Amino acid sequence: MRPENIRNFSIVAHIDHGKSTLADRILLQTGAISEREFRDQVLDDMDLERERGITIKARAVAIRYQRDNEEYELNLIDTPGHVDFHYEVSRSLAACEGALLLVDATQGVQAQTVANAYLALDGDLAIIPVVNKIDMAAARPEEVAEEMDSTFGFTPEECLPCSAKTGMGVDRIIDAIIEQVPPPPGNPDDKLRALIFDSHFDEFRGVIIYVRLIDGELRKGQRVKMLSTNATYDVTELGQFRPQRRAVDSLSAGQVGYVIASIKDLRDIHIGDTVTDAANPSADRLPGYEEPKPMVYCGIFPTDNDDYDDLRQALLKLSLNDSSFSFEPESNEGLGFGFRCGFLGMLHMEIIAQRLEREEDIDLVQTAPSVTYELGLRDETTISINSPDKVPDPSTIESWSEPIAKVSFITPSDSIGPIMQLCQDRRGKYLRTEYLSQSRTILVYELPLAELIVDVYDRLKSITRGYGTLDYEIIGFQKADLVKMDVMVASEKVDALSTIVHREFAMKRGRRLVQKLKQEIERHMFPIAVQAAIGGKIIARETISALRKNVTAKCYGGDISRKRKLLEKQKEGKKRMKQFGRVEIPQKAFLAVLQME
Ligand code: GDP
Ligand code: MG
């Protein structure tokens, strides 16, 4: 395929604005898939993703399309839409010359619309603005086009209206891709340079890498070299997803495809690396990416210790396909043997935990999340810790630093006051306000990541009745006056409930936490003291009074089905309990630290 007839593009959008639907609609309209296939969303092939509407792994589909007697190759590179997966968006965009910036005609510009638009602008891509869902009664395409104008400077005439659902306006979008996205600039006769923009582990084929050829040609059987590690491999298969995997003999400059080369371990592959010919290598490395570091950690323990090996296997399997997820063994007095796991953010954490329980059928206890801290010690060394139980003796600590996030909120203007209050209460630093339209505003704050992960997202949703969105990026570490807060239940210290808090907020947090725990821990045959302490000093206390009657006694009048339901519910709850000394603590209690006001 000649570079002049190739177009490489992505679709970027806020979550649920219709990216997957539009991708599938483009495949349908260009004949790449059938009507029936359209109905089962083809690009999101993991159950969990379909359910949550999130594409986690970026994928590339090559579409052959005929127009005016010219055959074009349109490579659609799929990107995830969620805030935790920024880096996957930018690495996919690096393989493109253009992007469709999709916005929902009922919702307007949202936090990830803005974040994704900036990623595309940073990558110097041609951007085609698209207003989707115009078939809906609640659509307000003119107003939304105005928001696109005031936020990004796209004129209302530039915004293409469409309905990914009905197909209306989609032909016009395909034309725009051919007319407005520049063809790839590379030279097929130069030395091979290909950018690795994604990879995944296939149970049957091993590592599959996704490449975008910049210069030269890649052939089956060719010996290739990775420029960052100098590792060499023989290409055993290469091809394209159309959308079914189709092997080809060669790919040339500008094209996008997959490579299989007997690579056994995903960790041997560096996203952003340059692939070149081993015998005739190019010396020029393409600009790469920095692998994102996990910023949010939590402990994951099997409820039943016999499941430890199964859990380890399952984590290994997940990490094979997700290099941003990390885990290492951890043991804990109360919880036994488990793993400390690192995630990009809260959603990433939720998805992995759900996947473990659902796909692997392992009951888990998940501890309260924590961020990475940097501690300056008196002996002038610095350590990184990702778990409250790794905090050394306080007398050895000189200073604490914590990760700081720059957070952009997009909110109805009448919610600005409560959101500012929320940020103030979370140690936020106000940066600026921008007006998106008469009724909607962008508010930018710096917030400690530790505060952001507690409940800011949930509070934003409730303050704005669902209309507010946020996006964040980590901008660095800053010194803060932090302390470790321990929790004792019936005089037993429960490590898994320890948290790191700001000294100024410790009292308030401690009090809220013990109150929460009092609600979550069921009454026992004896009274239970729940205490919060800093360095041995009790700062808050609640008592769970003793149980007097059998629970079923609450059901009057012999309503058998209700009694049975209650018993079943108790049994269900049992699975998610952990014994600490004489007290059973439900899994939910470990998340109580998350839900503090
Ligand atoms: P994504 O998260 O951006 O990939 O969004 P999806 O493609 O999964 O779409 C989110 C929801 O919006 C789904 O329920 C789609 O069926 C629906 N949707 C997408 N495009 C349209 C459209 O043009 N019109 C209508 N009415 N619904 C749409
Ligand atoms: Mg999707």
Image (tube, grey):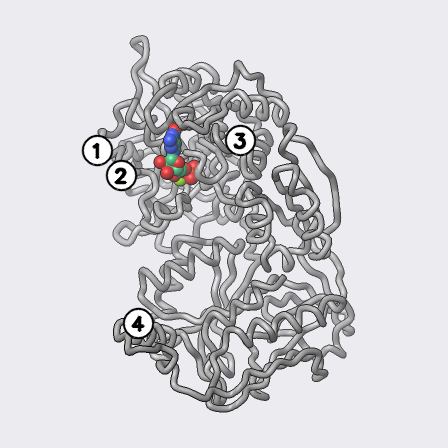
- Horizontal placement of 532 versus 207: left or right? right
Residue 383 percent location from the top left of the image? 67, 67
Disc 1 designates what residue?
36
Instruction: Tell which of 532 and 320 is nearer to you.
Output: 532
Disc 4 designates what residue?
562
Residue 247 percent location from the top left of the image? 26, 35
Instruction: Give SS at disc 2.
Output: loop
Disc 3 designates what residue?
108
Q: Residues within 10 Å of mark 2 (few under 14, many from 20)?
A: few
Instruction: Give SS at disc 3.
Output: loop
Q: Is residue 22 visible?
A: no
Q: Is mark 4 within 8 Å of ligand 1?
A: no
Instruction: Tell which of 321 and 469 is nearer to you.
Output: 469
CA–CA distance between discs 4 and 2? 39 Å
Residue type indicated by callout 3: Gly
Residue type indicated by callout 1: Arg
- Horizontal placement of 275 versus 155: left or right? left
Counting residues from the start of the chain, the first of labels 4 and 1 encountered is: 1
Q: Residues within 10 Å of mark 4 (few under 14, many from 20)?
A: few
